[in-house]
Image: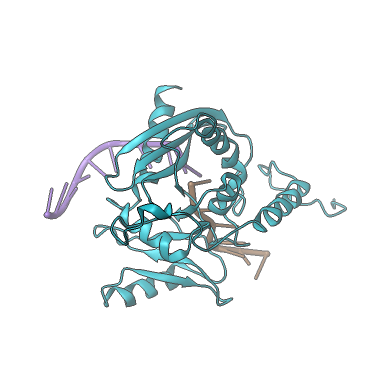
Chain colours: A cyan, B brown, C purple
Amino acid sequence: MEMEGSSTSSSTFHLSSDDDHKKWLEIQGSLKRKLITEDDYNWKLRESEEEEESSGVQVLKYIGGFDISFSKHHPSVACGTLVVLDFKTLDVVYEDSSIVTIDVPYVPGFLAFREAPVFVQLLKKMQDSSHPFYPQLLMIDGNGTLHPRGFGSACHLGVLADLPTIGVGKNLHHVDGLTNSRVRELLEAEDNFNVYFVPLVGDSGNTLGAALHSSKGSFKPIFVSVGHRVSLASAVEVVKRTCKYRVPEPIRQADIRSRDYLRKHH
DNA sequence: GCGACAG
DNA sequence: ATCTTGTCGC
């Protein structure tokens, strides 16, 4: 028998309707109007660039990381963790976790809708208490502009928080003609010149992000893209400087601690 | 039609 | 995301 009408996106486990997708698309489009893809902050990356203590310019000191882990047997039970690290020492100076229920399904291209509620909750807690370690910049375990509509979770969360954000993916989101093999070729070519990151230019000609070999031990690259209020060049620099291992510390610590917290409290 | 598809 | 042990190497 035939299904009439247009609502035929019938995967058995597809919890969201076509209407939900339309709403999601509208929300992404709406939030994207506020997106800033250039450096827009009042601090600087390096301590000794200039001597301008009087101009209100500060140094980047508190950098946040956010991640979510899910329960093994209860897929809707999750733990969101927000950490803040000292940018210079990479010590964790703040940590907060929260067990939550997440029933929003994971749909490629709409990751932010799963993560936003916990993220906002954790960040608001710091904001409301005027916490001295409130992050100046956040790293998100997902893509920013490296996204089908140029608005991945790092952009989404960045706009919600009105904070500079950087997107970091461990796997390539195939978009705009970008493939793993293509990325591999680009990296291998550049590695010969002692450059370990390459811009990711899609078929459209746009630069969606960068692939980079973050630590010497890993052949597998990570994917950095602009989230909000940060240029790609700055994003890459920050990521490089926070990588003790393949995954930059803010995200790695958030990942480790969220999984840890979930194991203990569930 | 088939494969791909961040976390 | 999660399922999963050992193992090779510095």
Taking A74 as reference, is A29 above or below it? below
- At a point 38% along the width and 30% down the height, the residue shown is A260
- At a point 39% along the width and 53% down the height, the residue shown is A54
Provide residue A37's location: percent of width, then percent of height.
Answer: 54, 62
Quadrant of the rendered image containing residue C9 = bottom left
Quadrant of the rendered image containing residue A198 = bottom left
Please identify the residue farthest to the front as the structure is shown. Answer: A54
Provide residue A9's location: percent of width, then percent of height.
Answer: 74, 51
Provide residue A66's location: percent of width, then percent of height.
Answer: 46, 42
Left-right relation of A120 to A136? right
Left-right relation of A23 to A141? right
Foreground residue among A72 and A227: A227
- At a point 32% along the width and 61% down the height, the residue shown is A50
- At a point 54% along the width and 38% down the height, the residue shown is A119
Foreground residue among A203 and A145: A145
Foreground residue among A55 and A60: A55
